[in-house]
Amino acid sequence: MFENLSDRLQNVMHKIKGYGRITEENISDMMREIRLSLLEADVNYKVVKEFTNKVKEKALGANVNSKLSPGEEFVKIVKDELTELLGGDSVPLETTKNPTITMLVGLQGSGKTTTIGKLANFLRKNHKKKPLLVACDIYRPAAIDQLKTIGKELNIKVYSEGKKDPVEITKNAINYAKENDFDYILIDTAGRLQIDDKLMEELQNIENAINPHETLLVIDAMMGQDAINVINGFNDKLKLTGVILTKLDGDTRGGVALSVRHLTNIPIKFIGVSEKMDGLSEFHPDRMASRIIGMGDVLSLVEKVSSEIDEKDAEDLVKKMTKGSFDLEDFLKQIKQIKKLGPLENIIKLLPGAKKMGLNNVKVDPKKMSHIEAIVLSMTPYERKHPEILKASRKQRIAKGSGTTVTEVNQLLKQFEEMKKMMKMMYNGNFKLPF
């Protein structure tokens, strides 16, 4: 997401960091590039104009006594204004009521039913909630079956009454949730190919009947600026509390995310970052602004690692690294933990300076990770603990068992030994970066 915009803006930031002072002349060139970058990213023209005017005004009026250099001051101004454009402060999802009722609405094809599963998974994992999915899309063929399939995959209960009146279904679902100790109710409503009176009337009837704590509009980021009209159309009839932008991972422009809050005053609460059931992230304007201008997103990285990797296992691994007793059994555990974090290229992009180090477009072939895992799994527990005993005949057996070659086995063992040495040096304070 935002790849094109991020590349262009980071180039601008790099140029201006070299300026000894900011003048009307040199900032005009920079603002022209920023303006073009935003327009090419499909950001609304009115939003672009206001943004660039604000940045220019603040940059020319920046405090000359600032501890930052002129270039650093400009980068800070751009980041602050981007944060403001994206919504300023993040608006968290309501989770305190028992049960909390959230209704998801949207057009057909926006990914609403998949998103409701992702949101339920997020709530269970991050807020220790017991969610109930409610099937109220009684029109789209197989919509109820799709929700049931998602519920089965996640082991989350789906409440359904078939093709009955959606208003009655939601009322009954709430009673069912209270009787069975569900503390979060997620209602999957019907969508249409376009906004129409019949759709809105049904959604209004549900909203009036149950008074949901959250009414979230699920919208496809690939719609571009048409999304603004859809948001306003729904908000005119319903009390929208937030937006979930889906498929943002597939949109290299991302302009709609930079226009939504400014033009509609509806906060973005979540973004879709992958097709998997854990591919939903809370939206933090300040973190996204940092990522766009190449400052990374360390907080999101820390949160992701903390939620996926067992703290005790991590501590045990560190102890073994410092003692030099890290073996292939530990290496296998490490691979499995890394796989939990999702595609490595997505993790790498969260690191500050990833683009500068040439890591922003790194593609990690998941097959290679699988090959490594297969090689280690083909070893006996004793071989993993004592890789020094791996001679020709054992390597041939391991290669055959893992569907790889002896050369690949040798490469893995060599890389493992080098990594082991480097880790020991690093944790003993003897490691120095070569730059």
Image (cartoon, grey):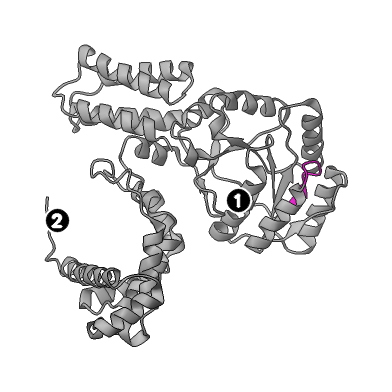
Disc sitting over residue 128 in the figure:
none
Disc 2: which residue: 433
Q: Amino acid at mark 1?
A: Leu
Q: Residue 111 placed where, x, y %?
A: 63, 42
Seen from the viewer's position, the closer of residues 148 and 22 is 148
Spatial CA span between label 1 and label 2: 41 Å
Q: Quadrant of residue 403?
A: bottom left
Name the image quarter holding the N terminus: top left
Q: Secondary structure at mark 1?
A: helix
Q: Residue 128 placed where, x, y %?
A: 58, 61
Name, please, the residue furthest toward the top.
Answer: 25
Disc 1: which residue: 119
Q: Amino acid at mark 2?
A: Leu
Whether residue 114 is visible? yes
Whether residue 61 is visible? no
Q: Which region is colored magenta?
A: 133-141
